[in-house]
Amino acid sequence: MLDATRIRKGMIIKREDGQLWRVVEMQLVTPGRWKAMVQTKLRSLKDNTVTDYRFRSEERVEQAFIDETPMEFLYQSGDDYFFMNPSTFDQVTLTAEVIGDAVKHLVPNVVYSVESSEGKPVSVVPPITIQLKVTHTEPFMKGATASASFKPATLENGLTVMVPPFIKEGDVLKIDTRDDSYLERV
């Protein structure tokens, strides 16, 4: 157990309902002569809902300890996603609910971090950058620089990102998975 004032962004806590929550945002608020509070935005690892929660500074919370295992994404079959541990070759089948927002970043043969609590997978964390091929984008129009300097591009996994005008279909791009932004052409 730790004091609420020691909560940090990215930490996983277990609330009184027994559910695991990831701290998305945290702010310590000290309003004048009142007691300090910790204002947090929490994301449920069970169903990915986001909620705002305010802890009193004297409150104690339980930090959940998560095991992280590197797993290679193999393929998708229906609603099931298959991962393999590259060192033991054990395979695990996960659902979209467990994978969460990382579902849009799944690319075969890329290693992801599968987080487990008490032996049960609770979430999947993608690498910070992934490389994806452009499947559709509008062609570059010479002299069209007066308007927007970026254009939308659809990638091989269905993700749409804004890219510079010189990007064309077939290019491989490096994408930041934290905010789905274009980094560079590979």
Image (cartoon, rainbow, N blue to C red):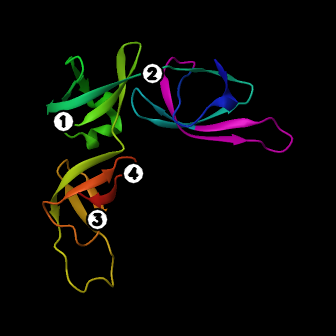
Q: Which image quarter holds the N terminus?
A: top right
Q: Which mark is residue 66?
A: 2
Pointer 1: what residue? Answer: 109
Q: Which residue is mark 4?
A: 179
Q: Earlier in the sequence, mark 2 or mark 1?
A: 2
Q: Position of residue 126 (x, y in %)?
A: 33, 38
Residue 46, compared with residue 146, is above or below; it is above
Asked if the residue under mark 1 is in contact with the one under mark 2, i.e. CB atoms within 8 Å, the reply is no
In the image, residue 26 lies in the stretch drawn in magenta: yes
The amino acid at mark 3 is: Val
**Is 102 covered by the magenta stretch?**
no
Q: Count residues near mark 3 (Cα–Cα under 10 Å), then give few for <14, some for 14-19, many for 20+.
A: many
Q: Position of residue 58 (x, y in %)?
A: 75, 25
> The magenta stretch spans which residues?
16-40
Q: Quadrant for residue 185, please give it.
A: bottom left
Q: Which residue is at 72% across, 42% downward?
A: 29
Secondary structure category for the residue under label 4: loop
Query: What kind of residue is marked 4?
Result: Asp
Q: Given the current orientation, which residue lies at the most extreme right position?
A: 33
Q: Residues within 10 Å of mark 1 (few under 14, many from 20)?
A: few
**Amino acid beneath label 2:** Ile
Percent x, y of residue 174: 28, 53
Residue 23 circle label: none
Q: Is residue 75 left or right of residue 104?
A: left
Instruction: Please give left or right for residue 42 compared with residue 142 in the image.
Output: right
Give me the residue at 32% from left, 27% from top: 98
